[in-house]
């Protein structure tokens, strides 16, 4: 079934800043400033492009991380790049980015319960009727680059990791960058404006030798999309991922009408299962059912070996 590109909403969009209060806009601005700072530090680590200490340092003060400001000063004053020190600062900044993320929506029309796929543990179910071609939730969470997604210290479990595309030239927070109208106070205004302007972001993205890849890892257990399983049966898939790199997430879209009580199933892709089997020895469990089953909670699934 083909999926169109414009969808109605069955859920709240936490990134719809024009519909949010000023506090949410301020949070988006602060998140954007950390993202810009992170990109600057990663360019230093990967390309040897030393940042301007006076531009980056205020960011750590604003976010209550004076120890990182001191670490940055020491690294910048060292005539030789301390790669381990830079890497450590990059990791701390990425965690700061995760802590600055906008809160996910509650998605009360979905409920987490015991999956009908044996040994799959939890799954995600429709709490009410969900029409076809609707966005029902978002697969969002901690943002990773290719490098951090391969780092054991940054990502201990890659089983939820989803590649969503390349870093956008105009991400969702782009329009709140560099303005003074949305700042919490004058200190925030000065620090964020010094680091985070649209011109600065355009420069970073434009000069990149290779546009970085973006991955998302929904570590927050309240992000319900993380519980959607792959049943490995084409006839049973009822939702799909629509990648939104500009919004650093994927929308979960219904492929057909879904009734209350149905479990949601999405295809992870063959590459995912090949990788899991190669790295963990995991053999995927397949949901089996007769042609008369309608995939409601009354169905008793079986395993196809």
Image: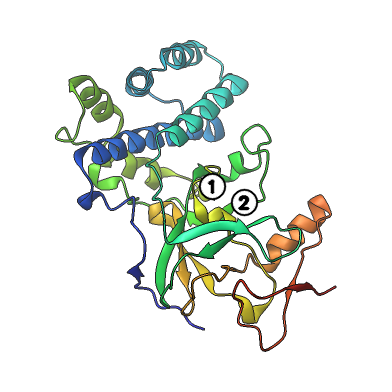
Tell me if mark 1 has few (under 14), some (14-19) or many (20+) residues whose alpha carbon lies within 10 angstroms of its own: many
Tell me if mark 2 has few (under 14), some (14-19) or many (20+) residues whose alpha carbon lies within 10 angstroms of its own: few
- In the image, 142 versus 163, the foreground residue is 142
Residue 161 in the image, given as x and y percentages of width and height: 60, 51
Dot 2 falls on a residue whose secondary structure is loop
In the rendered image, the residue lying farthest to the left is: 181
The answer to whether residue 279 is left or right of residue 212 is right
- For the C terminus, the quadrant is bottom right
Q: Name the residue: 41% across, 56% down.
A: 107
Q: Which residue is mark 1?
A: 218
Residue 15 in the image, given as x and y percentages of width and height: 32, 50
Q: Name the residue: 41% across, 76% down.
A: 131
Q: Name the residue: 24% across, 36% down.
A: 23
Q: Which residue is mark 2?
A: 160
The answer to whether residue 81 is left or right of residue 288 is left
Q: Is 260 above or below relative to 244?
A: below
Q: Name the residue: 59% across, 69% down.
A: 265
- Calculate the distance from the C-alpha at mark 2 to the C-alpha at mark 1: 7 Å
Residue 304 in the image, given as x and y percentages of width and height: 81, 75
Q: Is 92 above or below relative to 301?
A: above
Circles 2 and 1: CB distance less than 8 Å? yes
Residue 266 in the image, given as x and y percentages of width and height: 59, 68
Dot 1 falls on a residue whose secondary structure is loop
């Amino acid at each position: 079934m083909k999926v169109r590109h414009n969808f109605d909403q069955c859920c709240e969009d936490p990134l719809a800043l024009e519909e949010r209060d000023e506090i949410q806009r301020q949070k988006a601005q602060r998140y954007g400033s950390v993202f810009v700072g992170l990109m600057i530090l990663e360019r230093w680590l990967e390309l040897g492009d030393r940042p301007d200490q006076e531009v980056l340092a205020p960011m750590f003060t604003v976010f209550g991380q004076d120890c990182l400001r001191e670490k940055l000063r020491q690294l910048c004053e060292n005539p030789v790049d301390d790669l381990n020190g830079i890497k450590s600062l990059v990791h701390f900044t990425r965690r700061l980015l995760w802590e600055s993320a906008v809160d996910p929506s509650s998605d009360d029309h979905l409920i987490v319960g015991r999956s009908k796929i044996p040994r799959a543990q939890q799954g995600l179910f429709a709490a009410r009727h969900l029409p076809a071609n609707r966005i029902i939730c978002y697969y969002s969470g901690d943002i990773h680059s290719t490098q951090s997604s391969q780092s054991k210290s940054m990502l201990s479990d890659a089983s939820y990791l989803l590649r969503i595309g390349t870093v956008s030239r105009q991400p969702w927070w782009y329009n709140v960058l560099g303005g003074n109208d949305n700042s919490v106070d004058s200190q925030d205004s000065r620090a964020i404006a010094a680091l985070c302007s649209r011109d600065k972001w355009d420069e970073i993205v434009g000069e990149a030798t290779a546009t970085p890849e973006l991955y998302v890892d929904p570590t927050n257990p309240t992000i319900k999309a993380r519980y959607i399983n792959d049943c490995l049966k084409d006839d049973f898939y009822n939702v799909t991922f629509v990648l939104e790199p500009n919004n650093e997430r994927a929308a979960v879209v219904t492929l057909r009408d879904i009734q209350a009580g149905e479990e949601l199933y999405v295809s992870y892709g063959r590459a995912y299962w090949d990788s899991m089997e190669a790295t963990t020895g995991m053999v995927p469990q397949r949901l089996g059912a007769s042609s008369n089953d309608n995939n409601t909670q009354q169905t008793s699934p079986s395993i196809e070996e």
